[in-house]
Amino acid sequence: MKNRTKYIGLILICMMLGACSPKEDAAGLYRQESPLQADITMPEAFSGSEPIKIALTQNSQSVDDADFVHVEIWKGDGSFHDQMEEADNAGDGNYTFSKKLTEDGLYYIKVHAANNGSTIMPTLPFAVGELSKADVEALNAQTPDDSGNHDSHH
């Protein structure tokens, strides 16, 4: 009788543990990440007459109506820092931004964009006119080495 009770108890425990297995579609119950991506295209020789182009995509689809797309520009030596301004929606997931910069040097552009809960802030260096030796050194200091250590901030 005791052996029979042990076997029945063991079978009940196995059945209870079997009921605790995860559902096959459990991954679908969690929020799926769909990161926003930006492709920033600078004019060949930046003069300010041609706009900076920003193409936004999410889930391989163009983002026609992002929550926001703002642009911030500053000079590498700290002598110029423009306030964040809204980019113009050119349609089909493309946004444009124009800025006249008259001083030569190394500048940075940071795009602040968000759509459907995904926010990104890519930063890109660009040159206006001739770069000074200090600008070139600053730019080279930012170039990642090929050691295989690729840290991401986001």
Image: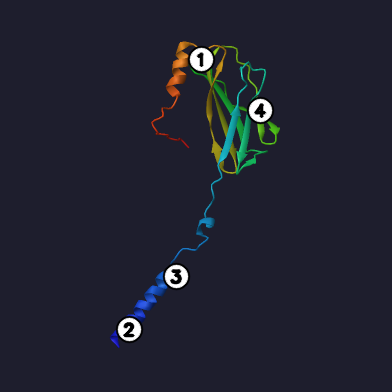
Q: Which of 129 and 108 is in front in this view?
A: 129
Label located before the other in sequence (1 or 3): 3
Q: Residue 5 carries which label?
A: 2
Label 3 belongs to which residue? 19
C-alpha span from label 4 to label 3: 56 Å
Label 4 belongs to which residue? 96
Who's the residue at 69% across and 36% down the image?
Answer: 92
Give the residue type that dot 1 points to: Ser
Q: Which of 133 and 146 is in front in this view?
A: 146
Image quadrant in which the N terminus is located: bottom left
Closer to the observer: label 1 or label 3? 3
Label located before the other in sequence (2 or 1): 2
Give the residue type that dot 2 points to: Thr
Mark 3 neighbour density, 10 Å: few (under 14) some (14–19) many (20 or more): few
Label 1 belongs to which residue? 79
Q: Do the residues labelled 4 and 3 touch (CB within 8 Å)?
A: no
Residue 108 in the image, given as x and y percentages of width and height: 53, 22
Who's the residue at 51% across and 56% down the image?
Answer: 27
Q: What element carries label 1?
A: loop
Q: Do the residues labelled 2 and 3 touch (CB within 8 Å)?
A: no
C-alpha span from label 1 to label 4: 25 Å
Q: Is mark 3 on a helix, strand or loop?
A: helix
Residue 100 in the image, given as x and y percentages of width and height: 63, 16
Give the residue type that dot 3 points to: Ala
